[in-house]
Amino acid sequence: MPAKKRKTVQVKWVTKGEFTSMVDTRARRVLGISGRQFITRWKNGQYRKLDADTCPGAVELAILAPLPRKKSGRKNSKRGRR
Amino acid sequence: MAGKTPKEAADNFVFFIKETLSCISDHFVSAYQQSKKLYKVYYEPYAKVTAKSGDNYLLSVTQIFRAIPHPEQEGQFKAKTQEYSYRLLGGPKENTEILAYHWHPHDPGVKFPHLHLKDSPRIHYPTSRVCLEDFVRLLIRDFQIKPRLKDEEWKEILDRNKKAFEKMATWKVQNP
């Protein structure tokens, strides 16, 4: 009798280029801007009042995007100390 | 979930995430190593899940974690969750979000784990730390999402992975 086969799911380890492309796709879908624009605006502090309800998906975008750690868009952020 | 290297600990953690999500979706899980210690796991595109009624939903799961030295096992590493987002959407548009469990202490908004519900915008309902296994169980039990596996299989996976998670977690899930 053949061994029982479990329905497995794949993990796709992505490259930096693929990840950057994903952030760009996500930013366009969520905010209607490019990933690069999102990161620039974050650096400029335009998302200090980012809210998941007024913009669903934005918080997820923020935790996914490779945002700068030392110069966050949020004052007194702990991100710079991680 | 510990590993002899940061990457091994990360691989082990990603395996648990993948296995837990496999209970309800066959969608592949994406993983990215942003730095030596920082890892990001997510769905892109979002995963489609189907309820027993035939209704389709989309699932977005994002888990950000670090691989750190194990505090109790010298020479070992473990994964430590840094932020998470578990969302259920009614359709492909972001504004169809039905619920979202968030914890993002380093980003804008509230610092504690919380729940967003579609019917009460702008409210951040405080929660315990929510583990992925509890979120998947909620979808199967309360949203009637069809599991891909037999009942005894998905229950065994969720029980086993939650126990493994609780054993390693720095701060615990408060069970009801």
Image (cartoon, coloured by chain):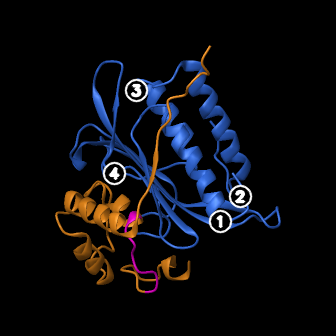
Chain colours: A orange, B blue
Dot 2 or dot 4, earlier in sequence: 2
Between A4 and B95, the one lying in front of the other is: A4
Q: Can residue A17 be seen at all in this image of the molecule?
A: yes
Q: Secondary structure at mark 4?
A: loop
| Residue at the disc numbered 4 | B44
Please, what is the three-letter code of the amino acid marked with disc 4?
Glu
Q: Residues within 10 Å of mark 2 (few under 14, many from 20)?
A: many
Q: Secondary structure at mark 2?
A: loop
- The chain identifier of the residue carrying mark 4 reads B
Q: Position of residue B171 (x, y in %)?
A: 67, 56
| Residue at the disc numbered 3 | B145
- The chain identifier of the residue carrying mark 3 reads B
In front: mark 3 or mark 2? 2
Task: Give me the disc on residue B3.
Answer: 2
Q: Residue furthest front?
A: A1
Task: Give me the disc on residue B6.
Answer: 1
Q: Residues within 10 Å of mark 1 (few under 14, many from 20)?
A: many
Q: CA distance from mark 4 to mark 3?
A: 20 Å
State yes or no: residue A52 in magenta.
no
Dot 4 or dot 1, earlier in sequence: 1
Please, what is the three-letter code of the amino acid marked with disc 3?
Ile
Q: Can residue B135 be seen at all in this image of the molecule?
A: no
Q: Secondary structure at mark 1?
A: helix
